[in-house]
Image (tube, rainbow, N blue to C red):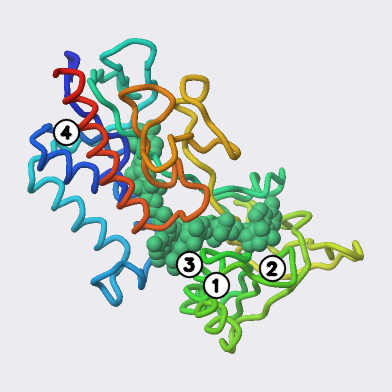
Amino acid sequence: MSDTRHCRVLIVGSGPAGYTAAVYAARAMLEPVLVQGIEPGGQLTITTDVENWPGDINVQGPELMQRMEAHARDVGTEIVTDHIATLELGARPFTAISDTGNRYSAEALILATGAKARWLGLESEDRFKGFGVSACATCDGFFYRGQEVAVVGGGNTAVEEALFLTNFAEKVTLVHRRDSLRAEKILQERLFRHPKIEVIWDHVVEEVLGAGTPPGVTGLRIKHARTGAERELPCTGAFIAIGHAPASELVAGQLELHNGGYVWVRPGTTETSLPGVFAAGDITDHVYRQAVTSAGMGCMAALDAERWLAAQSG
Ligand code: FAD
Ligand code: NAP
């Protein structure tokens, strides 16, 4: 793309929020353009079973996202494989520039860039990323057939990853910093009764241990959160599942953020602090962070954008 691509509504992000916004905006004849980003389909593409999407008792995450993409395309969304590197929101129309230099101008903008995995922040974790340290069991679990792995975290993601890893690993140890999980009760029950899973409570990871060329993980040095007692947990894979942070770096300094980087929206709407810019899904939601709530906010964003555009031209 050499010239600037002008659109009435530009949607950035292709998770449940982005695709739902696209369906509604396209059906409102706004001819939306949706930029997918480096993870087409968003976070659900790195999971397997989704059991809480209404209407599907069980659906695979990647399949659900393919269906959403097909739906958005079918009703007239232009879907672009590109990644936005810069957003210029100081003047209207807004400008988006991709990392390959493509330019988009937009009368209204819907931000649906979701969230990214959080890391522990240890130097040793960084050193072994891709060599035994992972944030995606669905992507990397297969490499640990017959081995011992650890999962760090206590939310839905950690419990689901631990359960999923039992398909490959000989033993899965969940390391959690407290003495209770925040995961849904139904998932906790599955975890506790699984014969391959052990839970180590009240422990934090101090260091990822490993050696060799290429490097490989041999264990974790973990510390009791209250007594400070340290021990080593042998494992060849460490899956970090301690939550996700909002992907709001594109708009930092341009839009009001709150609660540690989430885009602020006027309560009950998807209107950000800047007229014409709307936000939906995990980028703005520090409470629910579900596929269905993200999709709901995507719908709201398209409706909010449509009304705002109508008010501008009327
Ligand atoms: P995301 O799904 O995070 O998608 C963000 C999109 O933005 C991506 O397409 C990305 O490529 C794009 N993007 C980011 N930056 C840019 C950029 N600069 N330029 C262009 N595009 C960009 N929820 C449930 O309801 N049920 C479940 O069973 C469930 N399981 C989960 C399992 C795992 C392992 C994880 C991590 C989450 C799970 N969730 C589940 C939560 C759910 O996935 C999220 O709430 C939901 O995906 C958020 O949707 P979203 O559209 O806001 O953003
Ligand atoms: P989360 O709910 O925020 O849980 C993060 C977990 O990591 C918490 O247990 C937290 O401990 C722990 N943690 C955070 N920082 C840590 C650190 N520095 N060191 C050690 N432990 C740390 O994140 P999530 O599990 O990724 O879920 C994110 C959202 O997606 C949630 O809303 C969740 O419901 C949703 N989701 C839903 C499903 C599903 O519906 N089946 C599946 C996956 C995700 P504390 O408990 O002590 O705070």
Query: In front: mark 4 or mark 3?
Result: 4
Q: Secondary structure at mark 3?
A: helix
Closer mark to the observer between disc 3 and disc 2: 2
Instruction: Please determine whether, in this image, residue 278 is positioned above or below residue 76.
Output: above
Mark before the other along the chain sequence, 4 or 3: 4
- Asked if residue 175 shows in the view, the reply is yes
Residue annotated with mark 2? 175
**In the image, is the residue at mark 2 within 8 Å of ligand 2 by its beta carbon?**
no
User: What kind of residue is marked 4?
Assistant: Pro
Q: Report which residue position mark 3 lands on.
A: 141
- The residue beneath circle 1 is 162
Q: Which residue is mark 4?
A: 32
**Which image quarter holds the N terminus?**
top left
Element at label 4:
loop
Quadrant of residue 102 within the rendered picture: top left
The residue mark sitting in front, 1 or 4, is 4
Residues under labels 4 and 3: Cα distance?
Answer: 37 Å
Q: From the viewer's perspective, is 78 left or right of 177?
A: left
* Disc 1 residue: CB within 8 Å of ligand 2: no
Residue sitting at x 44%, y 27%: 250
Residue type at the position of mark 3:
Gly
CA distance for labels 3 and 2: 17 Å
Q: Amino acid at mark 1?
A: Ala
Dot 1 or dot 4: first in sequence order is 4
Q: Position of residue 145 (x, y in %)?
A: 50, 75
Eyeballing the image, is 69 above or below 30?
Answer: below
Tell which tag, 3 or 1, sits nearer the viewer: 1
Going 29% across and 28% down the picture, which residue do you hit? 109
For marks 1 and 2, the one nearer the N-term is 1
**Label 4 Cα neighbours within 10 Å, binned few <14 / some 14-19 / many ≥20:** many
Q: Pointer 3 and pointer 1: residues touching (CB < 8 Å)?
A: no
Residue placed at 60% from the left, 64% from the top? 237
